[in-house]
Amino acid sequence: MRKTVLEAVGLRRAYGPVQAVDDVSFRLAEGGSLGIVGESGSGKTTTARIVVGLEHADGGRVLVHGRDRGGRAGPRGKAGRLARAREVQMVFQDPFLSLDPRTTVGGALRETLRLHFPDADHGRRIAELLNQVGLGAREADALPRQLSGGQRQRVAIARALAVEPAVLVLDEAVAALDVSVQAQILNLLADIREQTRIGYLFITHDLGVVRCVTDDVVVMRSGRIVEAGPTAQVLAAPEHPYTRLLLESVPRPGWDPQGIAAARRAL
């Protein structure tokens, strides 16, 4: 049995009368890959933001290696906040928005390393990170606008890996990329997971991504988990009507969008 690296226990988050996250619990094993799937409004992204610390939960706990990440009060002092930030990192759908357009790739990585590891050999570590994500010296000197979408996402992954996190949260991280580039990034992430003990939390609506890169999956609807289990089992023999509806919504020969829409209204 692999150790649990991340555990969410009874997470809740409301926005006025809307319960965006309602009693959500799951575990992620060290070196494992867990997918959270659901349609827009299902609560999956709010759950991810709570895990990372970008949102406060109204109730429940997030634990990394069994340690509570601090709840609403959070860690005290700069060192405590930096240590918490290193535990869980996030890669967003659009890396262009998360990269400073005025800073080169090498500069962005150096800035992160200076903040978290001021005494490290930054030049050597930058070269290691770029190599790890399939980039080189040419990209190190480039600005974000001079890179392709796939290259920018590799930079975002390298910056997240720079702080040596225990968990990497990927929020629709390949949704904005061409299909061929998606495959390259997913293969890259698979290679990194083999080389390290990092755990992945994939937030996505794409069941194809879930099938390819996750060990286990959680299906969310209206803020609640409606089904969970090993990915292969859930996708091959879904038990909940909503999970079956998600699978039937994937375009294929004989696809019936009107029937799917009627089934969604009936749920």
Image: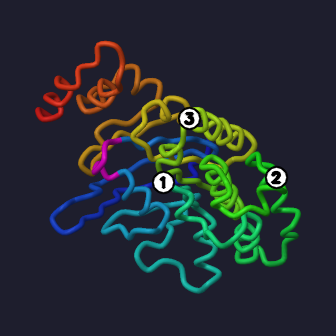
* Residue at mark 3: 213
Mark 2 or 3: in front is 2
Badge 2, how many Cα within 10 Å: few under 14, some, many 20+?
A: some
Which stretch is magenta?
38-43
Residue 46 within the magenta-colored segment of the rendering: no
User: SS at mark 2?
Assistant: loop
x and y percentages locating residue 228 in the rendered image: 38, 36
Tell me the colour scheme of the image. Answer: rainbow
Q: Is residue 261 left or right of residue 106?
A: left
* Closest to the observer, 30 or 265: 265
- The answer to which of marks 2 and 3 sits earlier in the sequence is 2
* Residue at mark 2: 136
Residue lying at 71% horizontally and 44% vertically, measured from the top left? 192
* Closest to the observer, 90 or 93: 93
x and y percentages locating residue 255 in the rendered image: 28, 18
Quadrant location of the N terminus? Answer: top right
Query: Considering only vertical position in the picture, is 150 above or below 107?
Result: above
- The answer to which of marks 1 and 3 sits earlier in the sequence is 1
As drawn, which residue projects farthest toward the left? 266
Residue lying at 45% horizontally and 68% vertically, measured from the top left? 54
Query: Considering only vertical position in the picture, is 212 above or below 85?
Result: above
Badge 3, how many Cα within 10 Å: few under 14, some, many 20+?
A: some
The kind of residue tagged 2 is Gly
Residue lying at 26% horizontally and 28% vertically, measured from the top left? 245
Q: Which mark is residue 7?
A: 1
- The answer to whether mark 2 and mark 1 are in CB contact below 8 A is no
Residue lying at 40% horizontally and 25% vertically, measured from the top left? 235
